[in-house]
Image (cartoon, grey):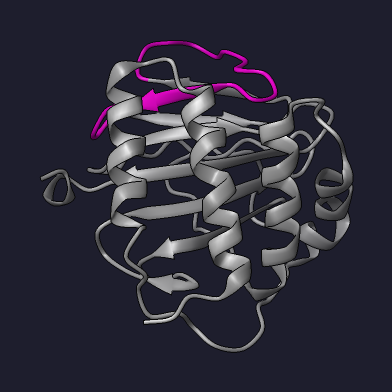
């Protein structure tokens, strides 16, 4: 199978950015397994992507910013080239933990994974955008997950309380742990990479 050059360029930048940011040994093992799987391309959706209004309002400003960290700036540049092919979507909030402005104030795009630009079941690689002062709902999922945070913003997992990874910060969610994120006065933008249990071996 062939992979578009824009997607390959993004993946080539994503691995060193994640690998440089992670500190948890479990997270490092997870990231290396994920990108080992991604060495083999999957079927890629053809055609253009779709932006949501929250993307039009905030994404270009995020992607044109400079972090001062070469690996992150390269990643943002490669994502900017890839982004027109992505389909941005919203999720339905369950429970009452999300902010009232959540439905119109967030967007997610799956780069590789189920229903993604590159369709596959062994890994999930994607990105989330929150408008200012939006809180994502508490949620959990079976795959373990590593975040790479590209902007200011707050996160929580398990009983941690809210914490701020900072630009270029990373943290690891164990399988099934409850977690969430929220933006302050500026948008929140973060990549995430998930490894299903069946894909570890």
Is 51 placed above or below 25 here? below
Residue at image position (69%, 65%) is 83
- As drawn, is 144 to the left or to the right of 116? left
Residue at image position (63%, 68%) is 6
Image coordinates for residue 72, horizontal then vertical, percent: 69, 35
Residue at image position (57%, 35%) is 17
Front residue (pair 64, 131): 64
Question: Any magenta on residue 174?
Answer: yes
Q: Magenta stretch mostly in which secondary structure?
A: loop
> What is the count of numbered marks?
0
Residue at image position (73%, 31%) is 70
- As drawn, is 93 to the left or to the right of 89? left
Question: Any magenta on residue 41?
Answer: no
- As drawn, is 11 to the left or to the right of 58? left
Image coordinates for residue 35, horizontal then vertical, percent: 37, 48
**Residue reaching furthest bottom?**
47
The segment highlighted magenta reads 158-177
Q: Can residue 101 be seen in this view?
A: no
Front residue (pair 185, 165): 165
Quarter of image, res 186: top right
Is 157 placed above or below 39 here? above
Q: Is residue 38 visible?
A: yes
Front residue (pair 9, 136): 9
- As drawn, is 183 to the left or to the right of 177? right
Q: Quadrant of the N terminus?
A: bottom left
Image coordinates for residue 163, horizontal then vertical, percent: 57, 13
Q: In which quarter of the image is the C terminus?
A: top left
């Amino acid at each position: 199978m062939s992979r578009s050059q824009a997607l390959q360029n993004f993946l080539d930048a994503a691995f060193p950015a994640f690998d440089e940011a992670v500190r948890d040994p479990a997270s490092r093992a997870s990231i290396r397994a994920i990108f080992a799987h991604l060495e083999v391309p999957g079927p890629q959706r053809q055609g253009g992507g779709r932006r949501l209004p929250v993307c039009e309002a905030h994404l270009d400003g995020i992607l044109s910013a400079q972090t001062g960290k070469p690996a992150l700036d390269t990643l943002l540049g490669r994502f900017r080239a890839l982004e027109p092919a992505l389909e941005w979507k919203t999720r339905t909030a369950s429970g009452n933990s999300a902010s009232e402005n959540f439905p119109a104030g967030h967007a997610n795009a799956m780069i590789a994974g189920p229903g993604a630009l590159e369709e596959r079941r062994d890994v999930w690689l994607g990105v989330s955008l929150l408008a200012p002062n939006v809180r994502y709902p508490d949620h959990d999922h079976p795959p373990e997950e590593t975040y790479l945070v590209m902007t200011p913003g707050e996160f929580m997992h398990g009983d941690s309380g809210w914490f701020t990874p900072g630009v270029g910060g990373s943290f690891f969610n164990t399988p099934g742990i409850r977690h969430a994120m929220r933006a302050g006065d500026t948008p929140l933008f973060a990549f995430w990479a998930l490894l299903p249990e069946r894909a570890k071996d």
